[in-house]
Structures are given as structure tokens and as C-alpha cells.
Image (tube, helix red, strand yellow):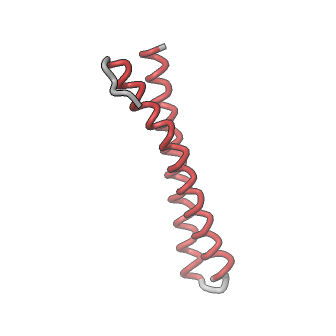
């Protein structure tokens, strides 16, 4: 990867980094969420406290995924608006 020499190249480099990181973050959140839900609702199905913990993880995970995707969309919108 070459060193950016203009503002446009710097922004494009940062946006490329964001475009690489966002799917990784979404994947990690999904794996952790799936594991926690499986642990709470399948492995500890008889424990009410674990089921409540699983619900909290599910809600938090969905919110995190939505926020990450929204931020990713806003970044893409700004990129397309400014740099065409």
C-alpha cells in the first residue's frame, strides 16, 4: 500500500480500511451473539437467569449490528456525495 499524497487518496485509504473492518466487526458480533444465544437458550435452557442474559445479548447484538450497518451506510453516502 502506497502512502497517500493527496487528501482524496487519504480519504480513499481510510474508506478502504473501513470497508475491510466493517464486515469483520459484523462477523465477530454475529459469532459472539450466536454463541451466547446458544449457550443461554440451548445449553442452559432450564436456568431462567441465563435465559434473561441471552435475551439481553440478543437485544444488544441486534442493536450493535444495526448501528454498525447504519454507520457504514452513512460513510458510503458521504463518500459518494463528496467524491462522486
List x then y, in percent, for residue 72: 49, 36
Which is nearer the eye, 4 or 84? 4
Q: Residue at x 38, y 27 (%)?
A: 2
Counting from the top left corner in percent of width and height, residue 59 is at 55, 59
Q: Is residue 34 above or below residue 49?
A: above
14, 45: nearer the viewer? 14
Above or below — where is 42 with respect to 14? below
Is residue 75 or residue 6 the one in the foreground?
Answer: 6
Residue at (59% x, 57% y) in the render: 30
Residue at 49% in and 19% down: 80
Which image quarter holds the N terminus?
top left
Task: Give the left or right position of residue 30, taking residue 9 as reference.
Answer: right
**How many circles with numbers are drawn on the protein?**
0
Task: Point out residue 77 in the picture as x, y percentages from the top left corner.
Answer: 49, 24
Residue 57 at x, y = what percent? 53, 65
Residue 3, quarter of picture = top left
Amino acid at each position: 500500500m502506497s502512502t497517500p499524497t493527496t487528501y482524496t487518496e487519504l480519504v480513499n485509504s481510510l474508506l478502504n480500511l473501513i470497508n475491510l473492518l466493517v464486515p469483520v466487526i459484523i462477523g465477530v458480533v454475529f459469532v459472539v451473539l450466536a454463541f451466547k444465544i446458544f449457550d443461554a437458550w440451548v445449553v442452559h435452557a432450564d436456568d431462567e437467569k441465563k435465559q434473561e442474559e441471552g435475551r439481553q445479548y440478543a437485544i444488544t447484538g441486534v442493536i450493535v449490528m444495526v448501528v454498525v450497518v447504519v454507520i457504514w451506510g452513512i460513510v458510503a453516502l458521504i463518500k459518494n456525495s463528496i467524491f462522486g
